[in-house]
Amino acid sequence: MNERPKAIFKEVQRFGFILRLFIILSMVAASAANGFGLYKMLSEPQSSSMLSIALLIIVGILFPVAMTMLFIMLKLETAVRQDGLYVRFFPLHLHFKRFSLDDINEYFVRTYRPIREYGGWGIRCGFGDSGKAYNVRGNKGLQLVFKNGKRLLIGSQQPERLVEALNSIRPDND
């Protein structure tokens, strides 16, 4: 059986409570308003086509509910195992992305400006030469610079521990 090595470091992060609450309440309000619109359309059937009713149900009610469920499930998972760094943004990434230390030129903890450098939180493409970012909260993270010049920032609430874990699996650390 193909079993992954045990995690030396593991961190699971979710978006902040206030942001999650705001998104959920916004989606609930949108669904409720559209539900009321649907009720009005159904109470006056002569002015409503089946297509407009179906579109209101799908776009106005089901889409906000689906987006709310997706947002509730979102989490950034980071793990260091003996064979590399693993990251996934579940449920957008069903499987972990593995980054081997052989492919990484350097890594370090840094403070960044999420909105100015990446336009916010989530899976983001930075401005200029910032590269990509996976982040959900805060302004600290692990900056990876790959041997091919690409950059990836992984947001973390424990960036120093993450670096310590990576240092412990470096080949020159034996």
Image (cartoon, grey):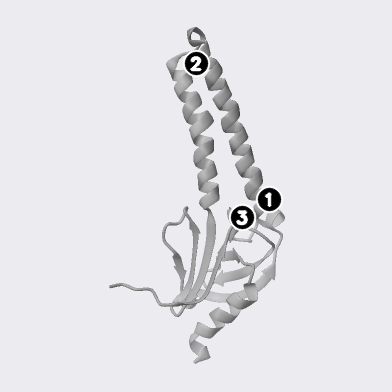
Q: Is residue 56 left or right of residue 4?
A: right
Q: Return the x and y of residue 102 as percentages of the image width and height.
A: 47, 78
Query: Under tag 2, what secondary structure?
Result: helix
Q: Who's the residue at 43% across and 16% down the image? A: 50
Q: Give me the C-alpha separation between circle 1 and circle 2.
A: 36 Å
159 to 125, vertically: above or below = below
Residue hosting label 2: 42
Q: Give amino acid for label 2.
A: Leu
Return the residue found at the far left.
1
28 to 141, vertically: above or below = above
- Crowd rating for badge 2 (residues with CA inside 10 Å; few <14, some 14–19, many 20+): some
First in sequence, mark 1 or 2: give its number. Answer: 1
Q: Return the x and y of residue 57 as percentages of the image width and height.
A: 48, 27
Q: Return the x and y of residue 67 as percentages of the image width and height.
A: 53, 42
Q: Who's the residue at 65% across and 59% down the image? A: 137
Residue hosting label 3: 15
Q: Give me the C-alpha separation between circle 2 and circle 3.
A: 38 Å
First in sequence, mark 2 or 3: give its number. Answer: 3
70 to 45, vertically: above or below = below
Query: Under tag 3, what secondary structure?
Result: loop
Q: Give amino acid for label 3.
A: Phe
Q: Give amino acid for label 1.
A: Ile
The answer to which image quadrant residue 29 occupies is top right
Residue 119 visible to an observer of this rendering: no
